[in-house]
Amino acid sequence: MKDINTLRAEILKLTEEYYHAKFGQQEFIPGKSKVNYAGRVFDEKELVSLVDSSLDFWLTAGRYSASFTQKLKDFFQVSDVHLTNSGSSSNLIALSALTSKKLGDKRLKPGDEVITVAGGFPVTLTPILQNGLIPVFLDLEIGTYNIDVTLLKEAITPKTRAIMIAHTLGNPFDLGAIMEVVKEHDLWLIEDNCDALGATYNGQLTGTFGHVSTCSFYPAHHITTGEGGCVVTNSRKIGHLVRAFRDWGRDCYCEGGVNDTCGRRFTQQFGTLPLGYDHKYVYSEIGYNLKMTDMQAAIGAAQMDKLPSFIDARRQNFDKIYNGLKDLEEFLILPRATANSNPSWFCFLLTVRENKGYTRNQLVEFLDENHIETRNLFAGNLLRQPAFMDINHRVVGSLDNTDYIMNNTFFIGAYPGMTNAKIDYMIDKFHQFFKQL
Ligand SMILES: Cc1ncc(COP(=O)(O)O)c(C=O)c1O
């Protein structure tokens, strides 16, 4: 019988061959092939890494989780990265961590207000509601699709304790204005960085401004692990809390399969438990289990090596699409990077100018007939969605732009899988649509 190292090497060699046979060169046929708005971009390395981890059959966090975590820490230059099973759960535990009694008077308590926006993906908002906090909505800007900070100071009351918003589709929000208010009013800042991995503001990565931030590794995102995400913080204290909320609420922070990291496993006093009760089974938070598996981390570790080239490709694709659609500005509002930022574009956002003889639905249906995929800016106005219509909230100013975006905005792909041929085809189709008006 062959030894296991030889067998493993043969399996991995075959996996590489399999990749080329199944996923290698796929030809783009204009008018026939689909132009996706996003998708997984990977090569044999991800597949080999995944199979390698499956052969370990460790399953829960192991060597690949350690390597993926380290690569993320190096990327963000932070003390703590905690892998999770999604961007949504990352948002949930990032905010929940700030409700911990261990934060004393600084902790978020039910009834505290959190500034956010109503236009975007629901799970930036849901943790606010799930923790009994009150969302306070500001409008969006058309063009950057980020929070309009004009009324930010007006939105603040003695009850305001935090700001939780996303860098919309890779475009950083106005961190200058937000950080000023965060500092002045001693607020928590939770950055939903799920759609913006690699974006910078004044040269600094988004996700490193707030007290805590989140990433998503769902396939449409900058890197993928299938399902997956992480929470990022440069505070050891917040990191411990995030981990506790992720890992059943437990106080112990040993890695899987490890005992007594703190050296005080049987000597501490917690709650009204007997002295020395096993630290492994002490619960200091009301938590969840939202951990990532090592197989997901194996894909993520391989994706991390491609991240810089992915970010570059997204920026280049954005520029190509922008230049190709520039002459259609009479009909379409083109996206605009926030001042002082270098976005890591998730996609290419467009807004229909009203009263130009066509509607968003007509345009996206035409694109769809031509196999060009589009998406709306997620939920539009969350306050108009069935689940959120009756939530306890406050609105400062109007949400007119949010409604305009709900009615008129959509996006197309700018992800690294967009080749020049796909981009040229897409630009052609836009011109064809407006010529026939
Ligand atoms: C801004 C934002 N936050 C969070 C999420 C949730 O991420 P996930 O799908 O990994 O739960 C998404 C979804 O794509 C998102 O767009």
Image: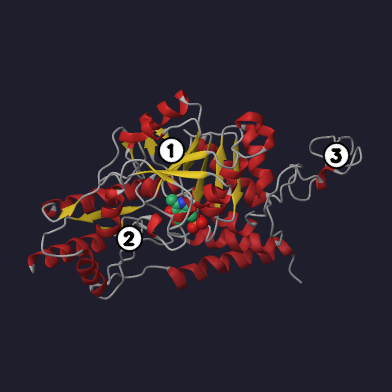
Q: Residue at x 27, y 68 (%)?
A: 372
In the displayed image of the protein, which residue is found farthest to the top?
Answer: 184
Q: Secondary structure at mark 2?
A: strand
Give the CA separation, mark 3 to mark 1.
Answer: 37 Å
- Which of discs 3 and 2 lies nearer the camera? The answer is 2
Q: Which residue is mark 1?
A: 206
Camera-nearest residue between 302 and 333: 333
- Residue 157 screen position, x and y as percent: 45, 32
Q: Is residue 228 above or below residue 205?
A: below
Disc 2 crowd rating (10 Å Cα; few below 14, some 14-19, many 20+) is some
Disc number at residue 238? Answer: none
Percent of width and height locating residue 169? 37, 50
Q: Across the whole image, how many numbered discs are drawn on residues? A: 3
Q: CA distance from mark 2 to mark 1?
A: 24 Å
Residue 140 appears in which quarter of the rendering? top left
- Going from the N terminus, do you reach mark 2 or mark 1 first? 1
**Type of amino acid at the residue the image marks with label 3:** Arg
